[in-house]
Image: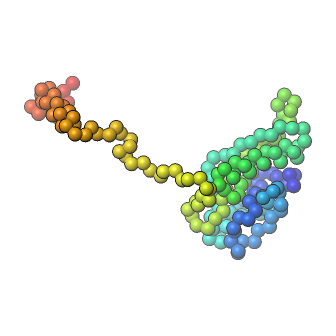
Amino acid sequence: MTESIRVGTMLLKDGTRIPKTLAVSTERYSAGWSFITASTSAQFDTKVENAGWTLFYMAGEIRTRSFGFNDLARTASAVAKVINAVRRDSCNCLEIIAIRHGSFLGLPYTSLIAHSRHIQRGRRFENPSPMPERESSRSHELLYDPAPTGESQTVFTAEAAQAWENEGGSRSGSSHPVL
């Protein structure tokens, strides 16, 4: 099956829910993943959109490289690394966007670039990961040192006001600060 991996190949995690109206043919690739046949990524994206679902395109490339003398084994190893990265992103689909073969010091390698994709109903990405979600926003009070409390705050404020007045703060007719 590795010979079927080329630029534009989309792999779909087995068991992924897809719209019933979406007729998609797949071929088994590896344990838990199948590749989509008879459809380019753009065509598949259009079909998903027409069914009222969303096929997310995650920002950030996944780059992998595998070394070895067997071309099929190198490609399979690189794809396995991409699949692991897609699992970490909690996505159920991936798209191969570049494949490059080369050699380094006489050792052949295969380099893959892919993007995580995710198919689901709805426009808001639902992360099925068991990891706790990050805090979406912090309170602005946490960004600054807490204000002093009690009498020291009053004394500090009075001292600051007195110092300002001693420098001509309230008597200054100018709108520019005195330097």
Q: In the displayed image of the protein, which residue is found farthest to the bottom? A: 21
In the image, is 160 to the left or to the right of 144?
left
- Measuring from the top left, give residue 136's x and y in whole percent: 47, 52
Q: In the displayed image of the protein, which residue is found farthest to the front? A: 150
The quadrant of the image that shows the N terminus is bottom right
Q: In the displayed image of the protein, which residue is found farthest to the top? A: 179
Residue at 81% across / 45% down in the picture?
A: 77
The quadrant of the image that shows the C terminus is top left
In the image, is 28 to the left or to the right of 150?
right
- Measuring from the top left, give residue 85's x and y in whole percent: 70, 48
Pick the front one: 40 or 81: 81
- Locate residue 17: give its quadrant: bottom right
Q: In the displayed image of the protein, which residue is found farthest to the right? A: 70
Q: How is the image coloured?
A: rainbow
Residue at 78% across / 58% down in the picture?
A: 33
Vertical order, 8 against 19 (above or below)? above
Q: Say if residue 86 shows up in the picture.
A: yes
Vertical order, 151 against 9 (above or below)? above
Residue at 55% across / 53% down in the picture?
A: 132
> How many numbered discs?
0
- Locate residue 8: give its quadrant: bottom right
- Locate residue 111: give its quadrant: top right
Q: Say if residue 40 shows up in the picture.
A: no
In the image, is 178 to the left or to the right of 102?
left
